[in-house]
Amino acid sequence: MEQIHQNVETLVVVGSWNKYIFSEEWVITNILGEGVRYTIQYPLNALGSLKFSLENITFYIFGDRLLFQLNNDLDLSYREIIRMARKIFQKLIHTPVTALGVNFVYQSSDNLGMLSQLPKNEDLVTIIGHDISSSELSRTFNLSEYETLNFKVEQKDDNSNIFNFNFDFRIKSLSDALNIIGDDDDLILKKRNFANDIINVI
């Protein structure tokens, strides 16, 4: 089983984000500080802000989402995302927000028996009249009054399997988001360990 990081938004915050505030000057002055090494990618889409890449993490705004991605699988990188998010939340505390999500994606080449409960592919092909490119199993679990886990398993044509974990927190403000991430930097690590525990028994 392999965890996938490329093109995965490990932390997502949905709200009325202003991409224009994410200028290089503002981010350096308010978030990164002087002397931090970083690179910038300019947006290819009108919905995107500048994309800031550090050694371990990348962050930017796209549409109504503040996005954080991992550049490696080091524990310190997961913690760095939380520290960076906390700074942004505190500086932009009045930004209206509705949700905070923590995401993980895994890939396995093993064939899974759990997908046998899906309708038979040959039956669906007969009914619909087109080939199937993937089969999917999805479930939503209520972990608390404000948190759900959206769990999806997708089986590809080559019998590889993609596991998606989305821990979704319902929030009404960035103050709520600050309470969820807490005073330590371990929220994403705790959710990764939770996902790993599930993966290990599948």
Image (cartoon, rainbow, N blue to C red):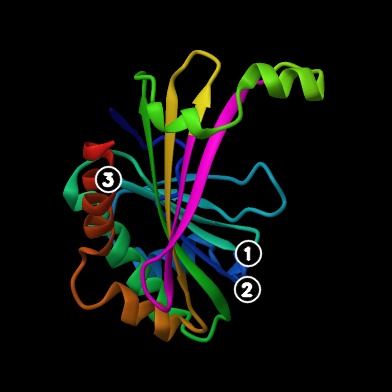
Question: What label sits on residue 64 in the rendered view?
Answer: 1
Say which of 157 and 188 sits in front.
157
Q: Label 1, secondary structure: give it.
A: loop
Query: Disc 3, disc 1: CB below 8 Å?
Result: no
Quarter of the image for the N terminus: give it: top left
Give the extent of the magenta segment.
132-153
**Which kind of residue does numbered mark 2 sit on?**
Ser
In the rendered image, residue 21, in percent from the top left (x then y), is placed at: 57, 70
CA separation, marks 1 and 2? 6 Å
Residue 141 lies, with reference to residue 137, above or below; the image says below
Say which of 163 and 187 sits in front.
163
For image coordinates 44% across by 65% down, the residue present is 148
Answer yes or no: is residue 28 visible.
Answer: yes
User: Reading the chain from its start, which is encountered first: label 1 or label 2?
Assistant: 2
Tell me the quarter of the picture where residue 125 sits: top right
Q: Label 2, secondary structure: give it.
A: loop
Answer yes or no: is residue 33 visible.
Answer: no
Q: Is residue 202 left or right of residue 131?
A: left
**Which kind of residue does numbered mark 1 sit on?**
Asp
Say which of 78 and 162 sits in front.
162
Q: Residue furthest top?
A: 158
Main secondary structure type of the part rendered in magenta: strand
Question: What label sits on residue 198 in the rendered view?
Answer: 3
Can you identify the residue that label 2 sits on?
16
Task: Tell me the crowding category of disc 2: few under 14, some 14 to 19, or many 20 or more residues within 10 angstroms, Cα based.
Answer: some
Task: Tell me the crowding category of disc 3: few under 14, some 14 to 19, or many 20 or more residues within 10 angstroms, Cα based.
Answer: few
